[in-house]
Amino acid sequence: MKYVFLSCVAIFMTLCGESTPEKIQFSKESFTSKSDYKLPYRLLKPQKIEKDEGYPLIIFLHGAGERGTDNEKQLMHIASSFTTESYQKDYPSFVIFPQCPEDGYWGTVEKVDGKWYVGESQDPSPSGQAVLDLLDDFIRRNPVDRSRIYIAGLSMGGFGTLDLVRHRPNTFAAAVSICGGGNRRYVTNYRHMPIWLFHGAKDPVVPVSLSREMHVEFKARNMDCQYTEYPEGGHDVWNEAWAEPGLLPWLFSKQSETKD
């Protein structure tokens, strides 16, 4: 009798237009640049878009293990945190998770014999440039608040985050690099950029020294950089980092004064 009653309630609610909320999820999208570079990506939109209102945009760059063309693997880490009701309520925003091809890198960086090397190229990597092209195209077509564009990434994506900010420092309002690294020669490129670095002290994949050195360079110039290091953390500290209570309030409080 109990189950019959519940079924009747469900039918009644449907007939009255009180259906259960749809599951919040990323849509599958694809972008082709002017240079014919194809970049699959997943997109999450604000649940309700108000007329004449601009919304923040987050670009999130995945790690090396999520490369491919399936347009699926890049959602393996962090993505689910954006689809919660609480996130949607507190931080309505566009969220883009692009996917890097198997042989690509988000930044001018490569891993040789187990060691990471950060390059000094004056141009972004092909995959990184595709992300910037996607960004430019997206903000032309959607109600994005151009003063609140953020970029974040983990591992290979942490390197990519710092690299793309180096090339386009006035585009982003803030950046989050988790277990990544950058080229210290270009620290002054970040002078207007609030950055939060995260790393595990016992990271066996990306040396913690890469984040420590960047932090030292930033602070030596009195730049806006926070650094959180987990004493017992390995390489996979991204879940712990993204769950830091102050991270999202910090991120969404940042606004850029100048834009490319």
Image: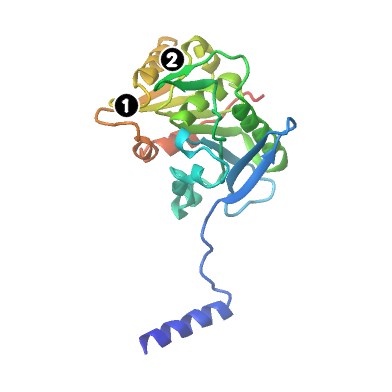
Side (left or right) of 110 relative to 37: left
Residue situated furthest left in the rendering = 232
> Which quarter of the figure is the N terminus placed in?
bottom left
Residue situated furthest bottom in the rendering = 1
Report helix, strand or loop for mark 2.
helix
**Residue 146 on image: x %, y %:** 64, 33
| Residue at left offset 58%, top offset 46% | 42
**Residue 15 on image: x %, y %:** 58, 80
Residue 218: mark in rendering: 2
Look at label 1 and name its amino acid: Pro
Residue 11 shows in the view: yes
**Residue 246 on image: x %, y %:** 38, 36
**Residue 22 on image: x %, y %:** 54, 63
Side (left or right) of 99 relative to 199: right
| Residue at left offset 54%, top offset 28% | 105
Report helix, strand or loop for mark 1.
loop
Q: In which quarter of the image is residue 192?
A: top right
Look at label 2 and name its amino acid: Phe
Which residue is denoted by mark 1 in the rendering? 204
How crowded pointer 2 is (Cα within 10 Å; few <14, some 14-19, many 20+) is rated as many
Is 167 or 35 nearer to us in this picture?
35
